[in-house]
Image: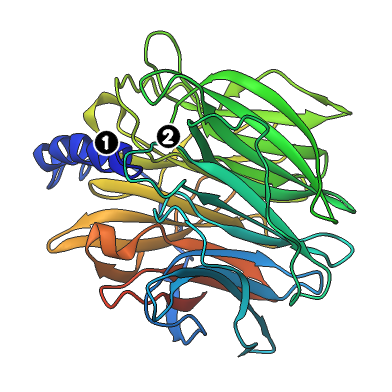
Amino acid sequence: MPPNSRYSENMDFLNKGLRSLAGPLLASALFVVSASAQTLKVEAMPNPAGAGSSQASWSATKAGDPLMSWVETAKDGSYALEYATRHNGQWSAAHVIAAHRHFFRHPAELPEVIALNDGTLVAHWIETPGAEESEAEFIYASTSHDGTTWTKPVMVNHDTTQIQHGLASIVASGDHEASIVWLEAPKGEDFPAYLMRTVVDASGTVKSEEKLDPNVCTCCPTSVVRTAKGLLIAYRGATPQDIRDITIMRFEGGKWLPAKTVFPDGWKLNACPTNAASASANGDQVAVAWYTAAAGKPRVEFAASKDSGATFTKPALVSTGSAYGYVSSVVNSDGSATVSWLERGPQGARVLARVVSAAGVMGPVTEVAKGTRKGVGYPRLLQAGGETLIAWGSADSKLETAKLSK
């Protein structure tokens, strides 16, 4: 089975079900819209990514400026991981992190670049061995103190067998270290995966690796954030009965607390939807948005926490039609959150966004972009430097970006 097959087959499986549910499936769903809320304004914003760019990801620099990373195709057909920063409304030149490597080219396998408290940049990405018949994936990381010179990439995962190690997310977990959370599938995609955590220091050295959960959904992305009390990971769990609801784990007081379900949607699925949750945090304020198709209703839900994830509000319905999912979220300075997602449109997919209060009160829906589901990819949000930004793919195979404002 070639590397991308587990994603394409799972999407075919889900799309068949979504076609039968398209239309006014959720038209009768009730949600509250704030009378004072304003529709988000979308201001198109140029970016330095070139032709053949995809897999956009965001973070903020030590100074709080937006940083966007992406994978771009070179003229010789090879790929490079690049990034640029935005300061006072102006983009820097694009910088190359790694080139001529076997990057796993799928929207769910996003490379990321983050800044540690000392300004060191840490990048991670997924590679395949290069052989078409291989299902193996491996995680690599590199660091830079000046943003230009990068350390030799190191494999993050200790296990080197030809299995899947991927769907990683990263967060600064100390002044001089980052935590990369990822999945290891020792028995293949038809069996549960392990939720893993690896610590990488500012020199690019792998310091430790630990298994956090031995039974999670095999090919759904992870999402890790840092709250006022510690780390919080959101991921799609799995039970022996094939219930695949969103689960969180928290690291507080020097230890991992028991995993718990954000809300028991009860989605029973004997497949992997490659479609999970997006967690975001600002101090004690935490937002989690996720996709589920429980009870035959493909939708995006949202829950908030005021105590670093110890408790959550009841879920609120974010989507208004038949959703594809692929959510992203950011916590705003006023405690609200902005959520983006993909929803089925008349001619393909729509990139939608709305503001949600901490109490689950919905603002109006704004259409950011539209295109094919594959073309728009996995849109990503960021709030940094006083701006809320979003990135997505286009039919022209070039990343698009915009600023969202109230």
Residue 291 numbered tag = none
Is 194 left, or right, of 64 in this rendering?
left
Circle 1 packing at 10 Å, graded few (<14), some (14-19), many (20+), is some
* Residue 158 in the image, given as x and y percentages of width and height: 68, 32
Q: Which residue is mark 2?
A: 219
* Residue 297 in the image, given as x and y percentages of width and height: 25, 34
Is 348 left, or right, of 134 in this rendering?
left
> In the rendered structure, which amino acid carries the disc numbered 1?
Asn
**In percent of the image, x 65 and y 43: which residue is there?**
224
Q: Which residue is mark 1?
A: 10
Is 254 left, or right, of 343 in this rendering?
right
- Kindly indicate the quadrant of the structure image that contains residue 202: bottom right
State which quarter of the image contains the N terminus: top left
Mark 1 or mark 2: whose residue is earlier in sequence: 1
**In percent of the image, x 37 and y 45: which residue is there?**
31
Of residue 314 and residue 171, the one placed in the foreground of this image is: 171
- Regarding residue 57, the answer to whether it shows in the image is yes
Is 114 left, or right, of 134 in this rendering?
right
* Residue 337 in the image, given as x and y percentages of width and height: 57, 55
Q: Secondary structure at mark 1?
A: helix
User: With respect to residue 273, does 324 lie above or below?
Assistant: below
Mark 1 vs 2: CB contact within 8 A:
yes
**In percent of the image, x 69 and y 63: which residue is there?**
333
Of residue 327 and residue 68, the one placed in the foreground of this image is: 68
**In percent of the image, x 42 and y 61: which residue is there?**
379
User: With respect to residue 386, does 316 lie above or below?
Assistant: above
* Residue 70 in the image, given as x and y percentages of width and height: 51, 68
> In the rendered structure, which amino acid carries the disc numbered 2?
Cys
